[in-house]
Image: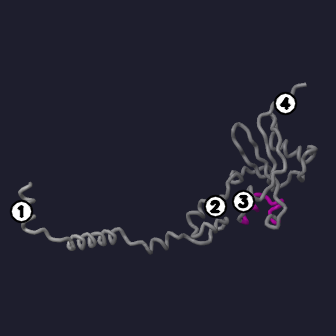
Amino acid sequence: MESKKQVGAFELFQLKDTPENKDLHFESYDRLTKHGHSANQDNYDQVYTGALFAGETLDSIYERFNLHHPDDFRGHSLSVSDVIVIHKDNRDQAYYVDSFGFKQVPEFFADNPLKKVEEILEDDYGMIDGIINNGDRRKEDDEKKPSVRDKLQEKKKGAAEAENSMPKPTEAVKKQEAELE
């Protein structure tokens, strides 16, 4: 009997049973994104990890976790809104189980897809919450900043005042300086 060759690994993720996820269970990917949501790993629990063998596909994994559950599997049958992560060839790819087939969801690996955008736009880093709600603080900053021309005029004025406040050299000092040159 020939043993199957392991070519990678896979993980199964299912939505956490929380009030926040109540409306996300069993939603198609289009419906999920239409309502402003994404496949965010923070909303999921890992329910299984297994070896990926040569010839296995997303469809064969789906079939196994619907018809022939392994003894150590404790999740529900693989369904719409679940995520399968494939680890193969030094790559990780996440797939949303959709109404028909699978949708690749690279955002599943993102810490928070809007975090970087929010860090730029939010007024308060305590408000990194997936919702851009404080507007663009650069608009306010631009109004407060003096122009380069204004800064230059201010520096020139300060330099002129500093020069005027310095003591004037006497005739004797000027004569000494002229002799040294």
Q: Based on the picture, tell me whether residue 30 belongs to the magenta stretch.
A: yes
Q: Based on the picture, tell me whether residue 111 belongs to the magenta stretch.
A: no
Q: What element carries label 4?
A: loop
Q: Please report contact status of discs 1 and 2: CB closer than 8 Å, yes or no.
A: no
Tell which of 175 and 38 is nearer to you: 175
Amino acid under label 2? Leu
Q: In this view, does 130 lie to the left or right of 179?
A: right
Which marked residue is nearer to the observer: mark 1 or mark 2?
Answer: 1
Q: How crowded is mark 4: few (under 14 residues within 10 Å), some or many (20 or more)?
A: few
Image mark for residue 175: 1
The spot of residue 47 in percent (x, y) is: 84, 50
Looking at marks 4 and 3 on the same chain, the residue that comes earlier in the sequence is marked by 4
Q: In this view, does 156 lie to the left or right of 52?
A: left
Q: Which residue is denoted by mark 4 in the rendering? A: 4
Amino acid under label 4? Lys
Q: Which residue is denoted by mark 3 in the rendering? A: 38
State the CA–CA distance, disc 3 to disc 1.
Answer: 82 Å
State the CA–CA distance, disc 4 to disc 1.
Answer: 100 Å
Q: What stretch is highlighted in magenta?
A: 22-35
Looking at marks 2 and 4 on the same chain, the residue that comes earlier in the sequence is marked by 4
State the CA–CA distance, disc 3 to disc 2.
Answer: 11 Å
Which residue occupies 57% across, 71% down? Answer: 135
The spot of residue 28 in percent (x, y) is: 79, 58
Amino acid under label 1? Lys
Above or below residue 128? Residue 91 is above
Rendering quarter of residue 181: bottom left
Q: Which residue is denoted by mark 2 in the rendering? A: 114
Which residue occupies 63% across, 60% down? Answer: 115
